[in-house]
Image (spheres, rainbow, N blue to C red):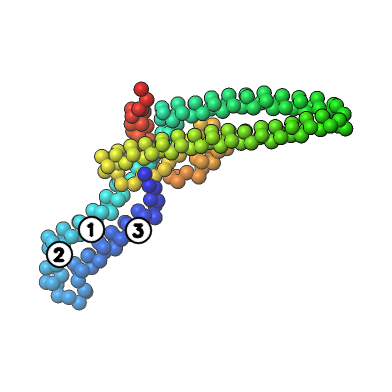
Amino acid sequence: MKSLGRTGIGIGVLAACLLVAELAIQGLGTTTAPAEARHASDGPADATVFQAAAEPAAALLGTVAVLDVTAVMNEMPELRETRAAIQADFQRAQAQFQKRQQELVQRRQELQEKSASDSSVREEMEKLGRELEQFQAEIQLQQRELLAREGKALMEAYARLNAAVGDYCKEHGITLVLRSTGRPVSAANPQEVLAYVNREVVWSQDSLDITPAIKSIMIGNDSRP
């Protein structure tokens, strides 16, 4: 699903209009040409050429649709299930890390209360320092793994969405789909508000919105057993 942008449409329409204008000039001839020659050029063949040249411009203007990609992906059952599993794993890992962190902090406090001149205390402090470094590395590794899982799930879901949109557009003669953004659920969420304000499509007719149709397709294509 490629968002070609408004520039592509404008160039196509402009080229078609220039071609129509050129054909019209050729059909009318110069102002110094005899009237008979001008009337002879206004035949059925010229009318057919004029109509054929104008049809591409009309087709381009009539086959545009808009789609709220985020709204559709948020309703895809497989993606929602994967996200829920990732969130559950994150919460479990967070609880384990917090418990271990408290244990390490408590050990450090106990060692700090002892004499720093004691060699065994120094060894324990050094050992604790290595454990803290390892603990931080484990947290970072866990975060990367969770982000990688979520990224993979998003890419797979988007690939399924892109294929469904392609099939739908081919079936309904749509040649261009622009990304749209629905109104934010909460005005207190700055990210949602910013995405809505910076949306690519400022306004469009409701009839151009294929979000409900694509959402229905993606929910119906749920491949879970």
Q: Is residue 83 above or below residue 19?
A: above
Asked whether disc 2 touches disc 3, contact meaning CB atoms under 8 Å apart, the reply is no
One can see residue 205 in this view: no
Check disc 1: other Cα within 10 Å, few if <14, some if 14-19, many if 20+.
Answer: some
User: Counting residues from the N terminus, which is met first, the one under dot 2 or under dot 1?
Assistant: 2
Residue 151 image point, x, y percent: 48, 37
Residue drawn 41% across and 43% down? 179
Q: Secondary structure at mark 3?
A: helix
Which residue in the structure is indicated by mark 2?
42
Check disc 2: other Cα within 10 Å, few if <14, some if 14-19, many if 20+.
Answer: some
Residue 24 image point, x, y percent: 22, 65
Asked where in the image residue 169 lies, by quadrant, the reply is: top left
Residue drawn 36% across and 22% down? 225
Residue 11's disc is: 3
Which amino acid type corresponds to the residue marked 1 in the rendered image?
Ala
Residue 49 image point, x, y percent: 18, 60
Which amino acid type corresponds to the residue marked 2 in the rendered image?
Asp
Residue drawn 46% across and 37% down? 152
Which residue in the structure is indicated by mark 1?
53
User: Counting residues from the N terminus, which is met first, the one under dot 2 or under dot 3?
Assistant: 3
User: Counting residues from the N terminus, which is met first, the one under dot 3 or under dot 1?
Assistant: 3
Q: Nearer the viewer, residue 24 or 95?
A: 95
Q: What number of labels is visible?
A: 3
Residue drawn 32% across and 57% down? 12
- In three-dimensional space, the C-alpha distance between marks 3 and 1, rounded to whole angstroms, equals 15 Å
